[in-house]
Amino acid sequence: MPRTARTRWRVGLTTTALLTAAALVPAPAHAEDVTDYTITVDPAAKGAKIDDTMYGVFFEDINRAADGGLYAELVQNRSFEYSTADNGSYTPLTSWTVGGTAQVVNDAGRLNERNRNYLSLGAGSSVTNTGYNTGIRVEEGKRYDFSVWARAEAGTTLTVGLKDAAGTLATARQVAVKGGWAKYKATFTATRTSNRGRLTVASSGAAALDMVSLFPRETYKNQPNGLRKDLAEKIAALKPGFVRFPGGCLVNTGSMEDYSEASGWQRKRSYQWKDTIGPVEERATNANFWGYNQSYGLGYYEYFRFSEDIGAMPLPVVPALVTGCGQNKATDDEALLKRHIQDTLDLIEFANGPATSKWGKVRAEMGHPKPFHLTHIGVGNEENLPKEFFARFEQFRAAIKAKYPDITVISNSGPDDAGTTFDTAWQLNREGKVDMVDEHYYNSPNWFLQNNDRYDSYDRNGPKVFLGEYASQGNAWKNGLAEAAFMTGLERNADVVKLASYAPLLANEDYVQWRPDMIWFNNRASWNSANYEVQKLFMNNVGDQVVPSKATTTPNVSGPITGAVGLSTWATSAAYDDVKVTSADGSTLLGDDFSGDASKWKHVGGGSWSIQDGQYVQTDAAAENTMVTAGDPAWHDYDLHVKATKKSGKEGFLVAFGVKDTGNYYWWNLGGWNNTQSAIEQAVDGGKGTLMTKPGSIETGRAYDIDIKVRGRQVTLYLDGKEWGSFKDDKPAEPFRQVVTKDAQTGDLIVKVVNAQSTEARTAVDLGGAKVASTARVTTLAADQDAVNTETDTPVSPVSSTFRGVADKFTYTFPANSVTFLRIKQR
């Protein structure tokens, strides 16, 4: 980023050498030194107190985060419950192959009422499971525990084997079945390592099978029905203050009915905690919102246990009977609402009640007689109907507070960082004197650099903030840098922002529904994203109190909004006509009535465009981001007019301006979010942020006149001749951010600096007269902005060093594209 010209100290070294030089060679702190920035610390003043629970993790079963992920079960579809309700491609035998005869049966011979399906296996037949990813992962010398529920005539033998294409992976085991339904076990020791194992169960006679399971003996902390060790250890290494679970969109989508005969064994339900406890063979199955099945082997008991194992506060979220995530429906069944409220009270008893209470006894019977010490609970998630949500939230809160007055009940502000829903929700939360409000947003790195001060102006006497989900739309180092810069603002405002968690947490690379994600894995390995390294650095060096500090800023260099124009659609077919771009002086820059060809337009997105009856039509109603562009990227100060007609599909129009390239533009998104709202979005280096939003929809078959006036950095928008809104995009994306905290236990000052630009930042640091040791422990993250960690290459990794130039006033050169923490001991 351009800065004013000045003399700068430089070393002609690689990034690695620069880290070593900066860390080990004291920079002279002479007054005549010219620096890029100044950080001034006031150690005598006291800033916000930081709670131990400030940073945590959010677990949602997305991207196969549970089954095939954190839950250590190696068999996929172990209970033959997969269904087209989960995914259109599923059958009850998905992930199984049959040798001989076998069929999945749903009849009175089942294992139990809540486990509806079982496998009927013919005499001399077998079934083989393919596991997840490339297959079942086993490691030489390690033990694996097999179990199955079976029913067969006495004398029937089950032969269980582990193989891959190269041969046997463990000595086969034989199990004698003795009659009615019973659980049978065996143990394997792997003789080879393989990522492509297959588990086969063969029967000498006709048999019924259910809950075919294979677990590694070595789970996290060797817990039964436990967690995959490497993934759990990566989460534990973050030292999270809390675990938010189980969602997310899993919580507030689908039917609110239970899994019973009365509901018709409803298979697309909201996440309801009672479905997920007790013996695993008695837990209900359910469709996952993200397009696969949930076995609920990883359920509420396991979430609570894992939270305890890693020293984190459990923070469950329950449905508020208003669906979100595009479904947007409020349930008006009072009896159903009362049942869910009672379920929430029962959940608190399950977590905290004595072993003699009804639900405390269930917890004790599962192996945990002591309480889990639940203190916070969330009601609802990202509801787009704030008034309907809040009316139900108040009923939940009243019931919880009446019985458990010390529980913090958390509300939310919808799915975005701003807009009508956000504003309405916050007004209701303030008026209702809510304890804490859960905010969610996913924006571009540029947005995070621009909004470090987001919480500076929040009411210190109003509801506290739980930033339950946030990320900067990518796993490159530039994303981590932007998030780090934003986190300095979270810490500075720790009196308002009491909890914060990046999202999502986990992604299996072969089953991805959402990017970015903090930890990536497959069946053989796991690796930390650049974002993870940022989170870990902050979470392991929080401090207990903010020490007030300030820094000089980067000179802001910005001109007018420049760029070409564009047309696009999203899951919609639309027709455009009468496009005209006029400069501020009235001259025509572009005119196209599509009476000829489309030679003025460049197709840079998906979809299918053609001239039809004098209109430019995008006909693929399933395609996303179908952009075509026209004009000069250097255009500025112009008026854009276009006539648009929706022909079919889920949404409306996308009219772009300020188009520099496919990753940098603005567009007016009319009828977005399943035709529920319109917004101005800005894309910067491929990541999008929302600048303003309003509710509204687009009618099919109606022609709309769309006008966009660009003057400098001011934009005014008109729909059918009426002003729809305006904005001024002039907020600087400050790349140099800092915060200082104090560790009460060690007395350390922790100076945290983010330099999110491609040039080093020579910085004068003034510790305000603090008496400090001459050395500092330094941890630095630095890499190319586009660097991405993978299974085989981790360019974004922490480097530890010592800096021996600390004084009351000293100079430090922060590397380009870096996050640097200096721990300085006070004397």
Image (cartoon, helix red, strand yellow):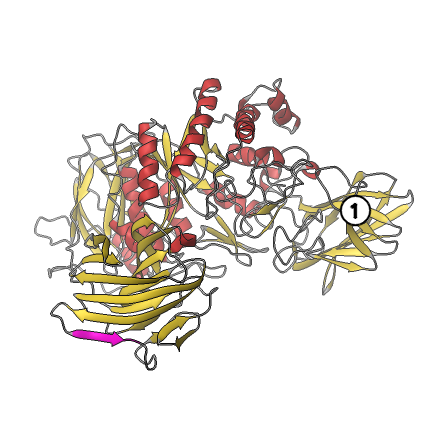
Q: Which residue is found at the position 28% from the left and 67% from the top?
A: 642
Indicate yes or no whether the magenta region holds residue 590.
yes
Q: Image check: 365 left or right of 40? A: right
The main secondary structure of the magenta stretch is: strand
Q: Is the N terminus in the top left, top right, bottom left or bottom right quadrant?
A: bottom left
Q: Image check: 143 left or right of 479? A: right
139 or 565: nearer the eye?
Answer: 565
Classify 655 as above or below 367.
below
Q: Which residue is found at the position 32% from the left and 80% from the top?
A: 595
**Residue sitting farthest toward the right:** 155
Indicate yes or no whether the magenta region holds residue 573.
no
- The picture places residue 570, in percent across and down from the top left corner, at 41, 62
- The picture places residue 421, in percent across and down from the top left corner, at 35, 42
How busy is the neighbourhood of tag 1: few (under 14 within 10 Å), some, or many (20 plus)? many
588 or 541: nearer the eye?
Answer: 588
Q: Which residues are magenta?
A: 588-593
Q: Which residue is found at the position 21% from the left and 53% from the top?
A: 727
Classify 234 as above or below 99.
above
Which residue position holds label 1?
Answer: 209
- The picture places residue 407, in percent across and down from the top left corner, at 44, 24
Q: Image check: 441 left or right of 368? A: left
Q: Image check: 296 left or right of 650? A: right
Give the residue type at disc 1. Answer: Leu
- The picture places residue 506, in percent across and down from the top left corner, at 50, 49
334 or 687: nearer the eye?
Answer: 334
Residue 777 appears in the picture as rendered: no
Residue 424 appears in the picture as rendered: yes
**The image quarter in which residue 644 lies:** bottom left
227 or 562: nearer the eye?
Answer: 562
Element on which disc 1 rests: strand
